[in-house]
Structures are given as C-alpha cells and as structure tokens.
Image (cartoon, helix red, strand yellow):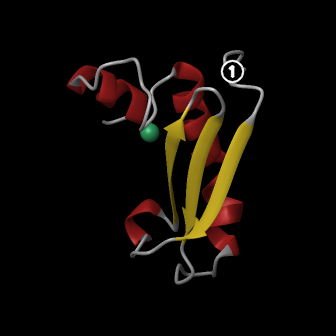
Amino acid sequence: MLPTLPDSLVIQVLQAPNDTSKVLGVTSRADSNDPKGELVVMLSTSYPGGMLAPVRERLAIVIYHEFHHIAYGWTMTNSHLSNSVLRVAVNEGWQ
Ligand SMILES: [Zn+2]
C-alpha cells in the first residue's frame, strides 16, 4: 500500500502530556522519513475507557496516517515538500 515506506521504522509510544479528549485519546507525529521512519504516538491515560480504548478505536488509523507522512516524505524534520495551505489541507484531511 505504501511502497516508499522505509524498511526501518522506529515507533515511540509515550504517555500524552495533555488532555487528548479532542483527538479521542491518541495523538501522533511523524518526525523523520530518512534514513529511517520515526514516529511518536502519545496515548492518554485519562481517556474514558482507559489507555486501551484509543488503542482499540483509533491506533491503526493514527499509525497509517503517520506512515503516509513518512512514505510521502512530509515529516517534521526532513521534509522536502512545502507547507502550503493546500498541501496541509489535503494531507491532514481538513474539511
Ligand atoms: Zn498528519
């Protein structure tokens, strides 16, 4: 599905430092895509249903979203693409 995804990926799973109710208990970011993919997933410990609720409900979606950033080459540290409003709207799924 994502043929340009690097062969090597590092995924850090951390406790979310803030209220994550607006993002349904889990937030994330793609830090790097070269030479390896690096992403961070932050889980809420106070979300209704506990830490496993967002894992069950949203983790696959969040990870796939960040994998797309990495495969596309649009990450926090070494992106070769612009941050135009149109690119952000399309890649982040703004409505
Ligand atoms: Zn995104």
Q: Is mark 1 within 8 Å of ligand 1?
A: no
Residue at the farthest right position: 7
Tell me: residue 80, above or below residue 34: above
Q: What residue type is labelled 1?
A: Leu
Tell whether 59 sits left or right of 27.
right
Foreground residue, 4 or 63?
4
Q: For label 1, count other residues whose C-alpha is less than 10 Å away and answer few (under 14), some (14-19) or many (20+).
A: few
Foreground residue, 35 or 65?
35
**Residue named by callout 1:** 2
Q: At 57% across and 81% down in the image, what residue appears?
A: 45
Tell me the quarter of the picture where residue 20 sits.
Answer: bottom left
Tell me: residue 28, above or below residue 48: above
Count of all numbered marks drawn on residues in the image: 1
Q: At 63% across and 81% down in the image, what residue appears?
A: 50
Q: At 53% across and 78% down in the image, what residue appears?
A: 47
Foreground residue, 49 or 78?
78
Tell me: residue 74, above or below residue 45: above
Tell me the quarter of the picture where residue 38 sits.
Answer: top right
Q: At 46% across and 33% down in the image, what residue appears?
A: 75
Residue 22 is situated, as x and y percent measured from the top left of the image, at: 38, 65
Tell whether 51 sits left or right of 8.
left
Q: In which quarter of the image is the C terminus?
A: top left
Residue 1 is situated, as x and y percent measured from the top left of the image, at: 72, 20
Residue 90 is situated, as x and y percent measured from the top left of the image, at: 36, 25
Image quarter for ligand 1: top left
Residue at the farthest front position: 35
Residue 16 is situated, as x and y percent measured from the top left of the image, at: 50, 71
Tell me the quarter of the picture where residue 88 sits.
Answer: top left
- The secondary element bearing badge 1 is classed as loop
